[in-house]
Amino acid sequence: MINRFDPHVVLAALKSVLPPKQSAVALHEPQFRGNELPYVKECIDTGWVSSTGKFVDRFERQLEEYTGVKRAVAVVNGTAALHICLKLSGVEDGDEVLVPTLTFVATANAVTYCKAIPHFIDSEVRTLGVDPFKLEMYLTEIAEVLHEGCFNMQTGRRIKAVIAMHTFGHPVDIEPLVDICNRFKIVLIEDAAESLGSYYKGRHTGSWGLCSALSFNGNKTVTTGGGGAILTNDEDIGKMAKHITTTAKLPHEWAFNHDMIGYNYRMPNINAALGCAQLEQLPGFLERKRALAERYKSTFVEIEDVEFFTEPEFARSNYWLNVLLLNNEDIDIRDMILEKTNSNGIMTRPLWTLMHKLPMFKQYPRMDLSTAENLEKRLINIPSSASLV
Ligand SMILES: *Cc1c(COP(=O)(O)O)cnc(C)c1O
């Protein structure tokens, strides 16, 4: 155990890995070195910038090919994708949805858009994602499985779904989770917003659940400016996802007819153009991100009391945002390191505030969250852009 950890040790280690830079080193920056400009120019030249166009279809087919799912539907952002995943999974007013407390706020927000209740669950240190074994014990204790589904005996509400979020690109231990979902009649949804290019036992994340959400926000591995996608292997859900995100309009040459309440969640063609160009470069991005992670790994092996987080043994991770874990739970040490690095032009960041601590989610049900709370005190994100190698 350390008494006084010198934050300069971490700063020096980061500096030894990162290229020298005039300006501050960001956490994650996009790179546009492919066909972005010609594709976007084509949209402008032809006038096809908005809600339909060939790049939207092309982007969806590219995503299907890359991830191996049957259907990808491009939408405005990852949060909208999650909203639709929940809706198409049958989440209704008053249902509970199991959500890791260790996630970005969008995961829990999307649950409330369906008037459902986020029920917070713990994560495991090995993956930073849902702990399937702890969840199984918890459900055995609090839930009963009836013909109509799984019910929380303490609240009387139905537990309709669980959202597995692949934290910083590292895959959740998904096989045992699939098994638990089947036994408890709970729908599995994946928040794969951070894990494009990450695989669990050779199969892409986002292809395990009934449906899943990707994000192409500016800080993600691939960006469309803002954007997202719904992935599914279920034909009906795929069809419905396209329909409901495009105002539920019935196809017709000139008439405007809609057969249900829909959403205007479609991705504009100009954003999809960016996405097509970015996806072409994804293998290169992943290679460089992995090379950066390797450098961090070999540097931090030498440093006592700080661990560089590496992919679980069953996974191949995209290393979206790199992670340091401090051995010490003293939050002052974490903050000293954050202060030292940020004031020296290297951007670092603590974990998101856990969901059950946010004012709007405080009152919702939760299990023991001790592992997430422990991780919150020890975790630091460090610069991860593909451009850093
Ligand atoms: C980025 C992100 C989202 C939301 O994506 P947006 O495109 O920003 O709406 C959802 N969940 C997680 C875990 C994310 O990291």
Image: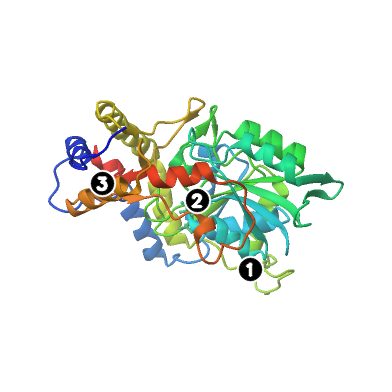
Look at mark 3 in the image and give the residue it sits on: 337
Look at mark 2 in the image and give the residue it sits on: 103
Residue located 37% across and 52% down the image? 219
Percent of width and height locating residue 165: 54, 45
Q: Classify the position of the C terminus by image quarter.
A: top left
Sooner in the amino-acid sequence: mark 3 or mark 2: 2
Under mark 1, the amino acid is Thr
- Alpha carbon distance from label 3 to label 2: 22 Å
Quarter location, residue 382: top left
Percent of width and height locating residue 347: 26, 51
Indicate if the residue with disc 2 has its beta carbon within 8 Å of ligand 1. Answer: yes
Circle 3 sits in a helix, a strand or a loop, which is it?
Answer: helix
Percent of width and height locating residue 92: 73, 61
Position of 165 relative to 301 (above/below): below
Mark 3 vs 2: CB contact within 8 A: no
- Alpha carbon distance from label 3 to label 1: 48 Å
Mark nearest the camera among 3 and 1 is 3
Task: Decide: few, some or many residues near mark 3? Use Cα within 10 Å; few <14, some 14-19, many ≥20.
Answer: many
Position of residue 348 in the picture relative to residue 175 (left or right) = left
